[in-house]
Image (cartoon, rainbow, N blue to C red):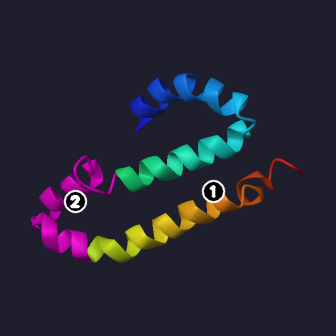
Amino acid sequence: LLSIVLIMTPILLPVVSSLGMDPVHFGVMMITNLAIGMVTPPFGLCLFVISDIAKVKLMPLLKNVAPYLIAMLVTLFVICAFPQLSLFLISR
């Protein structure tokens, strides 16, 4: 997670800034997207680690993770639709 943030932020931040998007809002969206990516295949590192530690096959684990994944996707949608939610603390 840290490596992708360190690699992609300097590449994407100028593009985002030129589009008029707040950098803090972009950061919140980026971290939320990366968190979703960590629990979804094919590159879901957290999913594979949990599967190995718990000695559970991947498909039953995916069924148990699905409600949390849906909640994360709804959260991402809300963050994208209402940037004020991720910016209200820095506006004070």
* Local SS, label 1: helix
* Local SS, label 2: helix
Q: Label 1, on which residue?
A: 80
Q: Of 63 and 46, which appears nearest the observer? A: 63
Residue 53 screen position, x and y as percent: 16, 59
Residue 79 screen position, x and y as percent: 63, 59
Disc 1 crowd rating (10 Å Cα; few below 14, some 14-19, many 20+) is some
In the drawing, does residue 12 fall left or right of residue 58?
right
In the drawing, does residue 64 fall left or right of residue 68?
left
Mark earlier in primary sequence (2, 1): 2
Q: Of 69 and 90, which appears nearest the observer? A: 69
- The prevailing secondary structure element of the residues shown in magenta is helix
- Amino acid residing under circle 2: Ile
Inter-mark Cα distance, 2 to 1: 29 Å
- Amino acid residing under circle 1: Cys
| Disc number for residue 50 | 2
Identity of the residue furthest to the front in this view: 19
For discs 2 and 1, the disc positioned in front in the rendered view: 1
- Residue 88 occupies quadrant: bottom right
Q: Quadrant of the N terminus?
A: top left
Residue 92 screen position, x and y as percent: 90, 51
**Is residue 14 shown above or below 4?**
above
The residue that appears at 70% across and 34% down in the rendered structure is 19
Q: Which residues are magenta?
A: 38-63
Disc 2 crowd rating (10 Å Cα; few below 14, some 14-19, many 20+) is some
| Disc number for residue 58 | none
